[in-house]
Amino acid sequence: MTRIVVETRSSREQAVSDVALLERVAEGDGRALSELSARHSLSLRALAFGILRDAVAAEQIVQTTFREVRYEAGRFDPSHFPVFGWLSELTRVSALQRSRVRA
């Protein structure tokens, strides 16, 4: 079984700055969305690929995730999930939906 590393930076400082980035995304800051994407796209792509076994579909899922983040960032509650956990859940659900459609 292949192990996937889902987070390259695990410090508390990283989590705080992810929350700050997400707050900026909620205010319409495109650079903050780009930074959040740069930090987490690789891990999210690996997660989607693990479900779909299709690199192109995995990339599409990650793009869909960040498009959803752009619109839903204001609803994020850091007391319920860390940012990466929320991103992972959005990615996982989208990938599972795609896999069911393809089956």
Image (cartoon, rainbow, N blue to C red):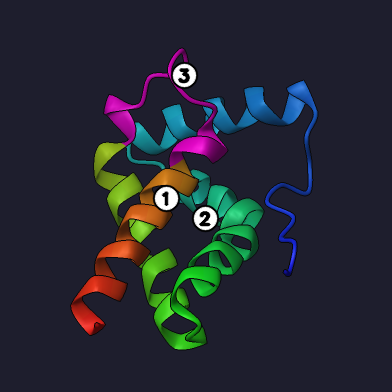
Q: Is residue 74 above or below residue 71?
A: above
State the residue position of label 2. 34
Q: Type of residue at label 3? A: Pro
State the residue position of label 1. 30
Label 1, label 2: how far apart the Cα atoms are? 6 Å
N-terminal label among 3 and 2: 2
State the residue position of label 3. 78
Q: Type of residue at label 2? A: Ser
Q: Residue at x 41, y 56 (%)?
A: 91
Pick whichever, 66 or 58, lies toward us. 58
Q: Is residue 101 magenta?
A: no
Q: Position of residue 23 (x, y in %)?
A: 43, 27
Callout 1 secondary element = helix
Q: Are marks 3 and 1 in contact (CB under 8 Å)?
A: no
Pick whichever, 55 or 26, lies toward us. 55
Return the mark for residue 66.
none
Q: Are marks 1 and 2 in contact (CB under 8 Å)?
A: yes
Comparing marks 3 and 2, which lies closer to the viewer? Answer: 3
Callout 2 secondary element = helix
Residues in magenta, as a range: 73-86
N-terminal label among 3 and 1: 1
Comparing marks 3 and 1, which lies closer to the viewer? Answer: 3
Extreme-front residue of the structure: 1
Quarter occupied by the C terminus? bottom left
